[in-house]
Image: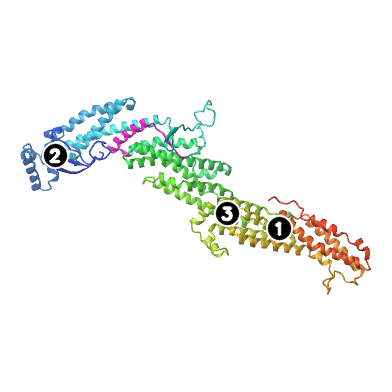
């Protein structure tokens, strides 16, 4: 038998005209009843019941025979009707007469309740029927509570068992009516937008098709995009909410709070699940999400972000509001009901995010994982607010756990990027020493990632990472370096090391320098023109510009040293002379021929090389011309001054000074890589 309201204490009223029975009275019983006690008057219940009550008090409080006798003596002194003979006649036996009043009440209530319990039509279709049924239930509740303190008497206990059975039948019928009211009320709902006042508009999940277009029974309409989240859904009419509240009040008062919460949760849960379906959310397991193709998963993530915002900002708060109205005054029942409604949908949404968090660490997934991470981060205040009660604590904690797990996934993706750079092989050389694909990929990747700089800084600062701490300690940056800036500098270092290994594939040292110049210049440009610049700092940019100038010098020495060397004579003590005055004509002609060959080969080769950056290309051309043309002009002038060659010097030299200028402008005309 269901536990009844427990007795706290019994006491006699001082004016000796009534016996007051003080028992715990739930606030749910009646809005007009006393919050802590109610009295059973002698005039209302009769002398027989009063004697039964007095006898029960004596039995209960008389722990010894002496105490019992004293209590009986006090009663007999109060009123002649409490004669010692009447009270002590059956003090140790159950008196069948004690249950007569209770049987009378049950005989009156049973046909009233049974009439509605067995009705084949909804009771709440007629307001008179619903009022009468609730009045009968109230009468049964009051009767059980009035007599519960005497449940030790066998005759009373038997009647109370009968009352419990009748109450259970009534509760089952109230459950059915509760469910029916929710189902009928949920067929349509309105949307209220809260501002200075409350305004009501239409909110529907109709598809984007024209209203005249028919939707098949197996099709789920798609929701229109939501841009304003400052709204709540009134999913049920106010009159229905009031009726549900009256039913809930009786069920909670009768000890059926869990049953009421369960039936409420099962009905409203269907509404939430349908709402998520209309927002494009599928019921997918973690394994199904992880098996999806990336392109399909990207689209699913977009739908998830929109649906989760609608659910957490609109649907869940609206359900919380509805629960609070239906279970007004019963906070525990309201909290339990809300958890029953939202648990499934919340877990469905969080499981999808968890599948993303524990999925592949492929670098191209970073940006969508960031979107999911930012969505949960931005919604955490709503999670804290909506799921603030004891029953929903696990949902709030789960949301927090998955959010943190997404942060770990983001750091894992950066680790995979590091591995990708390390594993990129140094096999085939890029034609012309141009921009390597790994450079373009990594720099554009980091530029795009740094658009979410605030989020990345939060991710890298939130959890301790010994490796990152070590890198930070070993970095030569300022003491104010953030974990994110250290991470970016480390990736840059890995990229530069990889490029240096690739530069060794070139047999020509000059071309190797051009390759490093190209990639170094590209890196500096991408850093300077993005958030990377502020992360890495001006010192980093300055140092890498110095490296590029050094590479330029290496190229200059490696490319034109042979040409410039031919225009000088070995063991010539006169550093200002290009040729000795007594040089043999044949030797001079051989040297001129060699010079022509070197110039031909160098210009021909370097015209196919690539310098992608216009400014750098012009700087290198000017530098080459600045070293080569003066030396060549001086060499030509000395040849013309020699009597052995004289005016025939031009006959042996293939190029004029003007030709050299033209050839310098033709350097690095290879097909440049796009920026």
The residue mark sitting in front, 3 or 2, is 2
Contact? badges 3 and 2 (CB < 8 Å): no
Precedes in sequence: disc 3 or disc 2 = 2
Distance Cα–Cα, label 3 vs label 1: 26 Å
Q: Residues within 10 Å of mark 3 (few under 14, many from 20)?
A: some
Residue visible at 52% across and 43% down in the picture: 289
As drawn, is 580 to the left or to the right of 560?
right
Contact? badges 3 and 1 (CB < 8 Å): no
Query: Which residue in the structure is indicated by mark 2?
Result: 19
Task: Examine the structure image and report whether residue 198 is included in the region drawn in magenta.
Answer: no
Q: Secondary structure at mark 1?
A: helix
Q: Which mark is residue 515?
A: 1
The residue mark sitting in front, 3 or 1, is 1
Query: Which residue in the structure is indicated by mark 3?
Result: 416
Query: Is 126 rendered above or below residue 426?
Result: above
**Residue 118 seen in the figure:** no
The image shows residue 504 at horizontal and vertical percentages of: 70, 61
Q: Secondary structure at mark 2?
A: strand
The image shows residue 528 at horizontal and vertical percentages of: 63, 55
Q: How many marks?
A: 3
Task: Examine the structure image and report whether residue 255 is included in the region drawn in magenta.
Answer: yes
Distance Cα–Cα, label 3 vs label 2: 81 Å
Q: Secondary structure at mark 3?
A: helix
Which residues, given as a range, are shown in magenta? Answer: 229-257
Quarter location, residue 638:
bottom right
């Amino acid at each position: 038998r269901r536990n009844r309201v427990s007795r706290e204490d019994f006491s006699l009223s001082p004016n000796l005209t009534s016996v007051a029975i003080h028992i715990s009275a739930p606030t749910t019983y009646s809005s007009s009843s006393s919050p802590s006690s109610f009295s059973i008057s002698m005039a209302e219940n009769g002398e027989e019941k009063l004697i039964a009550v007095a006898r029960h008090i004596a039995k209960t409080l008389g722990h010894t025979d002496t105490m019992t006798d004293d209590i009986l003596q006090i009663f007999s002194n109060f009123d002649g009707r409490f004669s010692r003979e009447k009270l002590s006649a059956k003090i140790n036996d159950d008196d069948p007469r004690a249950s007569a009043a209770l049987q009378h009440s049950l005989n009156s209530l049973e046909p009233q309740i049974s009439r509605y319990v067995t009705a084949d039509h909804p009771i709440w279709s007629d307001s008179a029927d619903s009022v009468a049924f609730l009045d009968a239930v109230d009468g049964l509740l009051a009767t059980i509570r009035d007599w519960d303190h005497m449940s030790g008497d066998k005759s009373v206990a038997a009647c109370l068992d009968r009352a419990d059975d009748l109450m259970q039948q009534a509760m089952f019928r109230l459950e059915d009516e509760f469910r029916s009211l929710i189902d009928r009320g949920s067929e349509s709902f309105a949307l209220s937008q809260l501002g200075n006042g409350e305004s009501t508009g239409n909110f529907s999940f109709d598809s984007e098709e024209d209203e005249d277009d028919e939707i098949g029974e197996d099709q789920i309409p798609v929701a229109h995009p939501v841009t304003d989240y400052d709204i709540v859904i009134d999913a049920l009419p106010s009159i229905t909410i009031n009726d549900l509240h009256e039913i809930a009040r009786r069920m909670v008062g009768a000890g059926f709070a869990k049953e009421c919460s369960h039936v409420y949760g099962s009905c409203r849960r269907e509404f939430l699940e349908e709402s998520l379906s209309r927002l494009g959310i599928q019921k997918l397991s973690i394994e199904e999400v992880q098996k999806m193709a990336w392109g399909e998963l990207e689209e699913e993530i977009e739908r998830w972000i929109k649906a989760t915002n609608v659910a957490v900002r609109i649907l869940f708060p609206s359900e919380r509001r509805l629960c609070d109205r239906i279970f007004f005054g019963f906070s525990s029942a309201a909290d339990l009901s809300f958890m029953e409604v939202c648990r499934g949908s919340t877990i469905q949404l969080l499981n999808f995010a968890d599948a993303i968090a524990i999925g592949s660490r492929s670098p191209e997934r970073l940006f969508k994982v960031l979107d999911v991470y930012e969505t949960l981060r931005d919604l955490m205040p709503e999670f804290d607010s909506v799921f603030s009660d004891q029953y929903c604590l696990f949902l709030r904690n789960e949301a927090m756990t998955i959010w943190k797990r997404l942060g770990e996934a983001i750091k894992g993706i950066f680790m995979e990027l590091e591995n990708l750079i390390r594993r990129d092989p140094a096999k085939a050389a890029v034609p012309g020493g141009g921009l390597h694909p790994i450079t373009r990929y990594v720099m554009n990747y980091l530029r795009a990632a740094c658009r979410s700089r605030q989020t990345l800084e939060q991710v890298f600062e939130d959890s301790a990472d010994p490796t990152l701490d070590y890198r930070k300690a070993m970095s030569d940056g300022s003491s104010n370096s953030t974990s994110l800036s250290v991470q970016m500098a480390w990736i840059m270092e890995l990229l530069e090391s990889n490029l240096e290994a690739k530069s060794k594939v070139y047999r020509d040292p000059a071309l190797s320098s051009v390759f490093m110049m190209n990639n170094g210049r590209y890196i500096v440009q991408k850093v300077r023109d993005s958030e990377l610049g502020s992360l890495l700092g001006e010192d980093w940019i300055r140092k890498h510009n110095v490296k590029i100038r050094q590479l330029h010098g290496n190229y200059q020495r490696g490319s034109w040293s042979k040409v410039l060397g031919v225009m000088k004579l070995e063991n010539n003590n006169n550093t200002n002379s290009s040729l000795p005055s007594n040089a043999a004509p044949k030797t001079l002609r051989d040297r001129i021929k060699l010079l022509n060959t070197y110039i031909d080969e160098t210009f021909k080769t370097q015209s196919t090389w690539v310098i992608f950056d216009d400014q750098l290309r012009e700087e290198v051309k000017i530098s080459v011309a600045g070293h080569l043309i003066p030396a060549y002009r001086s060499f030509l002038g000395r040849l013309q001054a020699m009597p052995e060659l004289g005016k025939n010097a031009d006959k042996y030299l293939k190029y004029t000074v003007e030709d050299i200028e033209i050839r310098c402008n033709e350097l690095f005309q290879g097909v440049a890589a796009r920026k």
